[in-house]
Amino acid sequence: MTTRSKSGSGAGVDFQIEGKAATRAIVLHVDRRDRGAPPTSDRAVEARLEEAVGLALAIDLEVEAAIVAPVAAPKPATLLGSGKVAEIAAVVKETEAELVVVNAQLSPIQQRNLEKEWGAKVLDRTGLILEIFGRRASTREGTLQVELAHLQYQKSRLVRSWTHLERQRGGFGFLGGPGESQLEADRRLIQERIARIEGQLESVKKTRALHRKGRARVPYPVVALVGYTNAGKSTLFNRLSGAEVLAKDLLFATLDPTMRVIQLPHGRKIILSDTVGFISDLPTSLIAAFRATLEEVLSADVILHVRDIAHEDSEAQAEDVNRVLEELGIDELRRGSIIEVWNKLDLLPPEERAGREAQALRRPGCVLVSSVTGEGVRPLLELIEGRLGADDTIYEVMLDAEDGQGQAWLHDRGEVLSRRNYPDGRVLMKVRLTTDKAGQAQARFGTAMKLLGQKKKVAAE
């Protein structure tokens, strides 16, 4: 068993919550080495431990010790072997920890047994992520999604482990039998609440669909940012949009989606959407709970996959993001709409930076940026513009001197590339139009329009 004290981990800051001392906690990463281990078990153990510590810090826990516990043969009752359970119990006693965060999925029985053995509250990975989500949610939709996921998790935790769950209540004497147990009543109440929230979320989903239809009529293409949590999406979003979205060095700093209209270098306007970060071993129930939010990604015209290229586990994190995108339904046909944004260029040492730059040149649809310094942002915007304009068509339109409305129409619905004023007041405008706008323009301008050609796909594709 590998143990790292708080002094060595840098996690020993005394956090305060509403004037009270932060909860003392031990972070335990279970290194599964059996055949039933999760698919991400080949990632660096130290990196996964660091991530678990980061999750704990995200809810202001005071991490007293960070431990790696290898497990070759998981035990149904406790997951860990008896020797490991005893060793960790000693650490709990020594540090006076009130909470043990287990970076693994625990069954209700395993969680109950470990709490008895250690004399401390036990929180598994799903429960920890739910705690973070609960703190980050700020909109009604986000709050509903978190509550739904939490209730589904809580429902699975209802076991006969506490005395109040063994009580009987209700019943009608010899006619009704012993009555309804507290356990059954709790399960029924939770299920009723789940049904109500699912109905409310269905209403939210319909509202989002209406909003998407409204944006389609504007119409601006949607560019969605996705990526592993803490990859720098919100900082990049702020850099591109000038907004002030919460951007901190915390896992899941963003939970509720944020959208802004921005203008690309050649005048095209887009809707930029920031989304919740992805993470490895994210339970399917959590993905399902946030599907309404993540549907913004499915409807996006371009997806920016933001990667923390300075992170030692960057490749594994990218695989985790791709896995979630597949679960959401991003098929191979949509892969061409994804641009890889290699962020945190400013954190790379010179030699590694040169290697990454050479690597990016060999990968189509990849751009290196620093959302902090702004380096690489202009090439990123041009690449987005190239992707969006790949199938656009270029026209020349001759307008009469008095047709100011026609000029405004072309500026609003297309990308004006050039204009030429004639002595008699006429104006010749060269404009790039999408397929649907070209049809509208034909109806509006008729023979005044002349086709020049279709824009070739950019080389980066």
Image (spheres, rainbow, N blue to C red):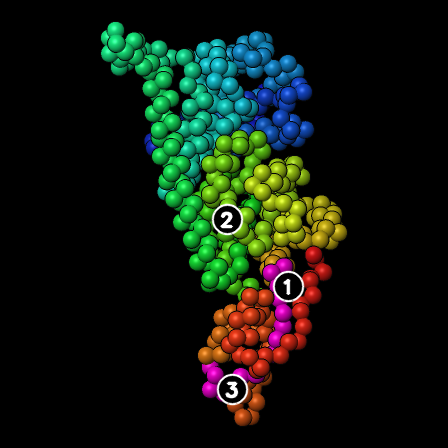
Contact? badges 1 and 3 (CB < 8 Å): no
Q: Return the residue nearer the eye: 282 or 189.
A: 189
Query: Which quarter of the figure is the N terminus placed in?
Result: top right
- CA gap between label 1 and label 3 equals 29 Å
Residue linked to disc 3: 400
Q: Residue at x 54, y 52 (%)?
A: 300
Image-based side of 235 in relation to 326, left or right? left
CB within 8 Å, label 2 to label 1: no
| Numbered range of the magenta stretch | 387-404
Q: Residue at x 45, y 50 (%)?
A: 209
Residue 50 visible in the picture? no
Viewed as shown, does residue 209 lie left or right of 327?
Answer: left
The residue closer to the viewer here, 113 or 48, is: 113
Say which quadrant the C terminus sits in. Answer: bottom right
The x and y percentages for residue 105 are 54, 23
Instruction: Residue 3: say if magenta.
Output: no
Residue 298 x %, y %: 54, 48
Q: Which mark is residue 254?
A: none
Q: Amino acid at mark 1?
A: Asp
- Identify the disc placed on residue 296: 2
Give the structural element (helix, strand or loop) at label 1: loop
